[in-house]
């Protein structure tokens, strides 16, 4: 299922935007003229054999130790490209939307994003972005909120 179909099915308003292809969340922030704090970057991790979708701002990186501690896991590691291709067969690699529930993954959102009014994210393709209200996103996804990122300098 495409993310726009998922949003329509759940009656969530959104804006679909087209832009030149971008391959990092920071590039997308620049292309969309949006702060990196409003770009929802999904990062897939495996904790004790289970996959999680971690959603954090474009201008931040995952603190694996904080995530491990917050999840009470023994081991946490980033998923590799092969695993990503298997988990998201309908998405271009690196353009996954931040909806773990669409893919049967638990979603964890970094607490730094909670105060934002909206998020922008890749729509499964490197040349499309979607903007949704933060409240709508949280109501639909019901992410677990944790502190697991640090800001890039």
Image (cartoon, rainbow, N blue to C red):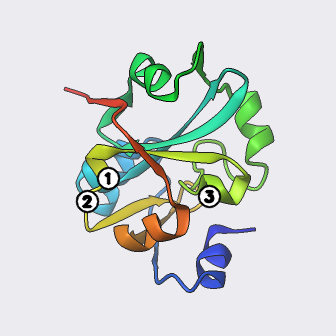
What's the mark number on residue 29?
1
Kindly indicate whether the residue at mark 1 contacts the one at mark 2 (C-beta within 8 angstroms): yes
Q: CA distance from mark 3 to mark 2?
A: 19 Å
Q: Secondary structure at mark 2?
A: loop
Q: Find residue 149 and report its horizontal and vertical position in percent.
A: 34, 31
- The residue that label 2 is drawn on is 34
**Residue at 51 percent of width and 81 percent of height:** 12
Give the crowd class for mark 2: few <14, some 14-19, many >=20 residues within 10 Å: some
Mark 3 vs 2, N-terminal side = 2
Q: Find residue 54 and report its horizontal and vertical position in percent.
A: 50, 40
Mark 2 vs 1, N-terminal side = 1
Q: Secondary structure at mark 1?
A: helix
Q: Find residue 52 and report its horizontal and vertical position in percent.
A: 61, 38
The relative height of residue 76 versus residue 24 in the rendered view (above or below) is above
The relative height of residue 105 versus residue 141 in the rendered view (above or below) is above
- The residue that label 3 is drawn on is 124
């Amino acid at each position: 299922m495409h993310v726009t179909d998922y949003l329509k099915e759940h009656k969530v308003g959104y804006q679909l935007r087209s832009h030149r292809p971008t391959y990092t969340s920071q590039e997308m922030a620049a292309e969309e003229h949006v702060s990196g704090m409003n770009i929802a970057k999904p990062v897939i991790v495996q904790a004790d054999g289970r996959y999680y979708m971690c959603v954090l701002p474009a201008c931040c990186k995952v603190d694996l130790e904080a995530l491990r501690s917050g999840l009470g896991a023994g081991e946490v590691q980033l998923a590799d490209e092969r695993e990503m291709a298997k988990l998201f067969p309908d998405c271009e690699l690196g353009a996954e939307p931040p909806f773990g529930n669409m893919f049967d993954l638990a979603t964890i959102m970094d607490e730094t994003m909670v105060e934002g009014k909206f998020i922008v994210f890749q729509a499964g393709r490197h040349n499309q972005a979607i903007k949704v209200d933060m409240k709508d996103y949280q109501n639909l996804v019901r992410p677990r909120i944790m502190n697991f990122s640090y800001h890039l300098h």
